[in-house]
Image: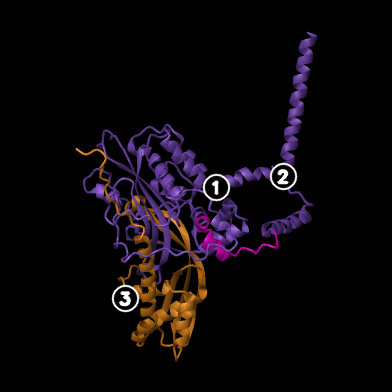
Chain colours: A purple, B orange
């Protein structure tokens, strides 16, 4: 039970002023700009766009500044802002095979058509703190070299190479035209379709999805995954505006995508073959898409005839707890005044203790 | 939203609309300033920002799912001769959406060849050059595998 409490207005107002001052920090240090955050803290921006579920670099950067770098708070701000905007359209499904590739690697095949393209990655850095970045004069304007020729146009997905031999399950649309579940418009429902699960995981908390993905590798799920392919780059987004009636391309979004290839021993109906797990995020976020692909595969247990025994295979557990806006909200609400609730509990405990005491005294007397 | 009146695809118009959607407002403003006799137009739908739900496909090729939204700004204008111009562009740049809609209208009229030459073609070249630059930088990080031949235990 919540009871409106009056009298905190001035305290709240001053607390707003104090957080504004705290957020600004030492006035002798230049203020960080939203553009600087967008350009130089780009991976934080990518995470906020993905989990905030709105692709807009400036808005995500603003949210990060406002939240003082608290990314979960920034995600909350972006989700809240989203509710003020009308929805114009639903896009045609993006075609990730037609990506302007910035990075594309496979851990399953060495010689893939189009090649292994490392792109901008921290994978091969030494993870030693680089004090050059802390130098007063800054890093200047580092420039990466350009090859003589661009990459091949249209890189095929690695999983499609296995596809030709029938060694991996096919991934073809079979519900074309069917309603696609939308978590922003309808409540969670179970059993969940893969569309609902993928949307939930795409918006889901990176830490939660990562831990679940990790759990499947450690034996709580029995996946045996290979990173079939990870790619990152721009894809065009197409919509068919009602007033035009034909498809137009409205711009690009940078996305990361992961195809996990998993061993599958087969079931009564299906021969042994590789199965797929899929991960997709806005921006550059490989950890998230790899973890998502592991959990996507784990959640396909029912469809594969596997017994769901572990947390990552339990769709209600995963889907109900993946959203960090909901999770943070429910945990944080404990901070709100529960004075009346607590008084009631206090009275109850006092009463129970009195009864307990009375009983002991009565037994001693007997 | 499934009640789409499917018109025939219009590849030519879709091409210039996508080029305009990827332009910056600075580029479109400069192009607008360069036009000697700027046409009058009425704004039918004021520039408005909203969302598009972006769909992906399970496994990249399977059934669609709702992936996440993106901000989009749209605008519609009408020239004095009645030609309507539209724009839907990623992001929240309202001035860009308005100018892109005007150029879309102009591209449907008698002066389209001139607009193509002075506005659309340079934007196309700039955007293609930017994509090529990105791709060349990525290509510079492509791995050239070579096989290590063990020379330490011959025969």
Q: Toward the viewer: A171 or B19?
A: B19
- Mark 2 is surrounded, within 10 Å at the Cα level, by few (under 14), some (14 to 19) or many (20 or more) other residues, namely some
Query: Which mark is first along the chain, 1 or 2?
Result: 1
Residue matched to label 1: A324
Q: Is residue A92 magenta?
A: no
Report the chain holding disc 2. A
- Above/below status of A46 relative to B131: above
Q: Is residue A37 magenta?
A: yes
Disc 3 from disc 1: Cα separation: 44 Å
Left or right of A251 on screen, residue A137:
right
Where does residue A224 sit, x and y in percent of width and height?
35, 37
- Above/below status of A156 relative to B127: above
- Mark 1 is surrounded, within 10 Å at the Cα level, by few (under 14), some (14 to 19) or many (20 or more) other residues, namely many
Left or right of B5 on screen, residue A281:
right
Tell me the element at label 2. loop
Magenta residues, start to end: A26-45
Residue matched to label 2: A337
Marks counted in the figure total 3
Q: Say which quadrant the N terminus of chain A sits in.
A: top right
Q: Are marks 3 and 1 in contact (CB under 8 Å)?
A: no
Examine the rendering and report whether any part of residue B10 can be seen. Answer: no
- Above/below status of A208 relative to A138: above
Q: Toward the viewer: A210 or A277?
A: A210
Left or right of A30 on screen, residue A90:
left
Q: Say which quadrant the C terminus of chain A sits in.
A: top right
Q: Toward the viewer: B6 or B131?
A: B131
Furthest toward the top, the residue is: A366
Q: Are marks 3 and 1 on the same chain?
A: no
Residue matched to label 3: B12
Tell me the element at label 1. helix
């Amino acid at each position: 039970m919540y009871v409106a409490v009056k009298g905190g207005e001035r305290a709240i107002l001053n607390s707003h002023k104090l957080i504004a001052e705290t957020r600004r920090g030492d006035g002798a240090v230049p203020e960080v700009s939203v553009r600087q955050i967008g350009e130089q803290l780009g991976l934080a921006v990518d995470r906020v766009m993905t989990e905030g579920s709105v692709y807009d670099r400036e808005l995500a950067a603003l949210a990060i500044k406002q939240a003082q770098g608290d990314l979960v708070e920034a995600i909350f701000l972006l989700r809240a802002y989203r509710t003020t905007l009308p929805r114009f359209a639903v896009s045609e499904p993006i075609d990730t095979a037609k990506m302007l590739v910035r990075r594309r690697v496979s851990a399953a095949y060495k010689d893939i058509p189009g090649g292994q393209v490392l792109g901008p990655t921290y994978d091969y850095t030494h993870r030693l703190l680089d004090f050059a970045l802390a130098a007063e004069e800054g890093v200047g304007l580092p420039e990466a070299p350009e090859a003589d020729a661009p990459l091949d146009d249209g890189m095929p997905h690695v999983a499609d190479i296995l596809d030709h031999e029938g060694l991996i399950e096919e991934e073809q649309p079979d519900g074309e035209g069917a309603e696609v579940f939308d978590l922003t418009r309808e409540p969670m429902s179970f059993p969940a379709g893969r569309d609902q699960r993928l949307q939930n995981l795409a918006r889901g908390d990176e830490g939660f999805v990562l831990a679940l993905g990790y759990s499947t590798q450690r034996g709580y799920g029995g996946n045996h995954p290979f990173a079939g392919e990870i790619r990152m780059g721009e894809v065009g987004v197409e919509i068919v505006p009602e007033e035009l009636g034909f498809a137009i391309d409205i711009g690009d979004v940078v996305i990361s995508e992961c195809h996990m290839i998993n061993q599958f021993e087969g079931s009564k109906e299906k021969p042994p073959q590789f199965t797929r797990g899929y991960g997709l995020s806005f921006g550059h976020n490989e950890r998230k898409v790899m973890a998502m692909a592991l959990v996507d595969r784990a959640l396909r247990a029912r469809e594969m005839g596997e017994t769901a025994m572990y947390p990552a295979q339990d769709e209600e557990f995963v889907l109900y707890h993946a959203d960090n806006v909901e999770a943070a909200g429910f945990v944080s609400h404990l901070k709100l005044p529960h004075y009346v609730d607590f008084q009631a509990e206090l009275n109850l405990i006092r009463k129970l203790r009195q009864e307990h005491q009375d009983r002991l005294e009565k037994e001693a007397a007997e | 939203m499934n009640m789409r009146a499917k018109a025939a695809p219009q590849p030519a118009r879709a091409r210039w609309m996508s080029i305009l959607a990827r332009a910056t407002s600075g580029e479109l403003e400069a192009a607008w300033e360069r036009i000697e006799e700027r046409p009058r137009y009425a704004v039918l739908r004021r520039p408005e920002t909203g969302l598009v739900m972006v769909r992906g496909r399970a496994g990249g090729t399977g059934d669609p799912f709702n992936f996440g939204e993106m901000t989009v700004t749209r605008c519609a204008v009408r020239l004095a001769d009645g030609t309507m111009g539209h724009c839907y562009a990623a992001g929240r740049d309202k001035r860009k959406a308005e100018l892109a809609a005007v150029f879309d209208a102009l591209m449907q009229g008698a002066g389209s060849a001139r607009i193509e030459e002075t506005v659309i073609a340079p934007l196309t070249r700039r955007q293609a050059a930017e994509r090529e630059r990105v791709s060349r930088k990525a290509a510079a990080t492509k791995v050239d595998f070579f096989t290590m031949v063990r020379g330490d235990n011959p025969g």
